[in-house]
Image: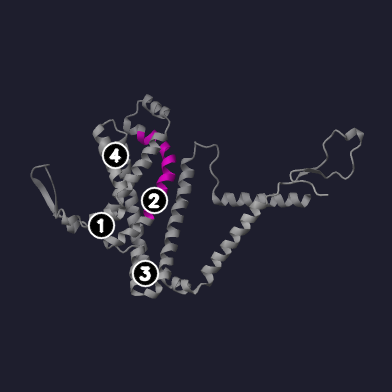
Amino acid sequence: MSEPPGAVVSLATAPPDEDTADKPPAAQRVLPLRRPGRWIATAVVLVLVAQFVHGLVSNPFYQWDRFAYWFLRPTILDGLLITLEVTALSAVLGLLGGIVLALARLSKSPVLRAVSWTYVWALRSIPLIVVLIFLYNFSALYRTLSVGVPFGPAFFSFDESKLATDMVVAVVGLSLNEAAYAAEVVRGGILSVDQGQHEAAAALGLPKGHQFRLIVFPQALRSITPNYVNQLIGLVKSTSLVFYVSLLDLFGSAQTMGSTYPGDIVPLLLVVTAWYLILTSLVSVVQFYVERYYARGATRALPPTPLQKLRTGLADLRARARREAAV
């Protein structure tokens, strides 16, 4: 006779006598609840994954030999370096601009608050491709730029078309767009710091700049980091748009090679996909360790690293196997 799920089964070999009738059995085993739905869903997912992998490997349309040929070609690697350069510069400038805009939004000056809010509203409303194309044709509106007294004489001027190279247009456009989103991320992180921390910093008699730099901002980074890394991953992918301002990044290089070798369009797109997956994965790894660093003092125990999770999982499997063997 089978026991119902969740029943407690005694493993004692002899029936208890009158003296031990009220005592618990020597060994007990709890039968886990059967979950057929979970096993069915797991089987369906495994079948779908196996079919997907089989299709990737067996379909000749993907041309994996051409994928291997293009993956490390100098043209692709040169575009990859431009993507990394644009991403790094735009991320730093965008974060700095976001911090300034966030502080302006939190300022007591109504002018600073209004200008910051307008900037964030406008740049989040305009598509990035429109911003890039507008900057690319900026010289049609202002042929020369000058520095001097407002509404007065100019000290010196320069040709905008010579200054605004393809790299400058790409970095400026991405930085302006990134700053608008980073401003909200930073503002949310600052507002997440408990008000008591602000009061404690003020009670210490620290200047406002020291309060923000030494007390408020380090605590806000716990909230800022995961959100801004999401923005950074989006920025890595957004660099593909700089192709439309004549900058041959990773996507632009693949697009150019696809025009020259139309039979290799699919392998080239797979190469671009693989490199973007690698870049975003590396950013995610950095995100984990940065979050783990700033979690010190906020949690009782630091989050385990992937290697620690693997060791713990293997130890649990060995312990479970020993328990099953003992039963």
User: Which residue lies at the image location 46% right of the left edge and 41% below the top edge?
Assistant: 294
Report the residue marked by disc 3: 74
Task: Classify mark 2: helix, strand or loop.
Answer: helix
Compute the Cα span from label 1 to label 2. 22 Å
Report the residue marked by disc 1: 133
Say whether disc 3 or disc 4 marks the residue closer to the N-terminus: 3
User: Which residue lies at the image location 65% right of the left edge and 54% below the top edge?
Assistant: 39
Find the magenta span and give its range: 212-236
Residue 206 location (% of width, % of height): 34, 28
Dot 3 amino acid type:
Pro
Report the residue marked by disc 2: 232
Q: Residues within 10 Å of mark 2 (few under 14, many from 20)?
A: many
Magenta residues: mostly which secondary structure? helix
Say whether disc 2 or disc 4 marks the residue closer to the N-terminus: 4
Contact flag, marks 1 and 2 (Cβ < 8 Å): no
Compute the Cα span from label 2 to label 3. 26 Å
Residue 239 location (% of width, % of height): 34, 57
